Amino acid sequence: MTTTDPLVEALLAVSRGMVALAARNLAALGADVTLPQYRALVVLAGSGPQRSAELARELGVAPSTLTRMCDRLVRKALVHRFHRHNDRRSIWLGLTPQGRDVVGMVMRARRHELETIVRSAGLTPTPRDLALLHAIVRASGELPDEEWWRRWEVSADPVDGAQLMRTNRLAPGMLN
């Protein structure tokens, strides 16, 4: 299926390249994280701790799918589950310092690779080009890079009124 809109076609191609770039960076760093798991970590880094139902909606997955995904991320010590003292019924999810570090390492590797691509292609964006890209970022619900990094810095900070939940440990090899 093709579209007649050249901007949409170009963005689809860029999107494929960005997914491939993320997958390469995850593999190169040995992060032992799938792309959907990584996306969950990125959302938690940018948005902070969330109720599990909100994170499932953000990721576009069923709550049961999110539960299984987070079971794996908890076992890998990248995410922690907790209750807030004023909200004992909801399960909250947040990044551990190790989870924040994985996201930061992958993002820095992606930045380095993108800088290389931009240089090798000889790209010099105009203010109009940058405005277009920033508009796409905003319309997609993502944060500008500077704001995302500010939130990333505090994404694994302790949450006031939080009580970590106990987790069941599975046998080794049950992490995926």
Image: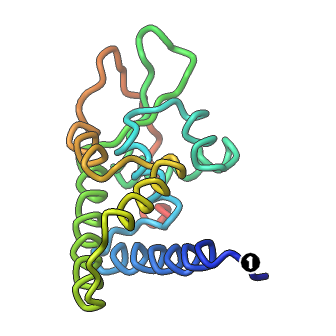
Front one among 151 and 5: 5
Residue linked to disc 1: 3
Three-letter residue code for mark 1: Thr
Left or right relative to 76: residue 147: left
The residue that appears at 30% across and 24% down in the rendered structure is 159
Q: Quadrant of residue 125?
A: bottom left
Query: Relative to residue 41, is residue 4 depicted above or below?
Result: below
Q: Position of residue 6 (x, y in %)?
A: 62, 79
Left or right relative to 9: residue 2: right
Residue furthest bottom in the image? 120
Left or right relative to 7: residue 167: left
Front one among 100 and 114: 114
Query: Relative to residue 43, is residue 156 depicted above or below?
Result: above
The residue that appears at 42% across and 17% down in the rendered structure is 84
Left or right relative to 24: residue 160: left
Residue furthest right in the image? 1
Give the position of the N terminus as an image quadrant: bottom right
Q: Position of residue 19 (x, y in %)?
A: 48, 74
Count how many numbered circles sit on residues in the image: 1
Q: Quadrant of residue 11?
A: bottom right
Q: Secondary structure at mark 1?
A: loop
Front one among 80 and 55: 55
The residue that appears at 47% across and 48% down in the rendered structure is 138
- Picture colour scheme: rainbow
Q: Position of residue 55 (x, y in %)?
A: 55, 40
Query: Relative to residue 65, is residue 85 depicted above or below?
Result: above
Residue furthest top in the image? 86
Q: Position of residue 74 (x, y in %)?
A: 42, 47
Query: Relative to residue 173, is residue 163 depicted above or below?
Result: above
The residue that appears at 55% across and 53% down in the rendered structure is 69
For label 1, the crowd category at 10 Å Cα-Cα, with few meaning under 14, some 14 to 19 and many 20 or more, is few
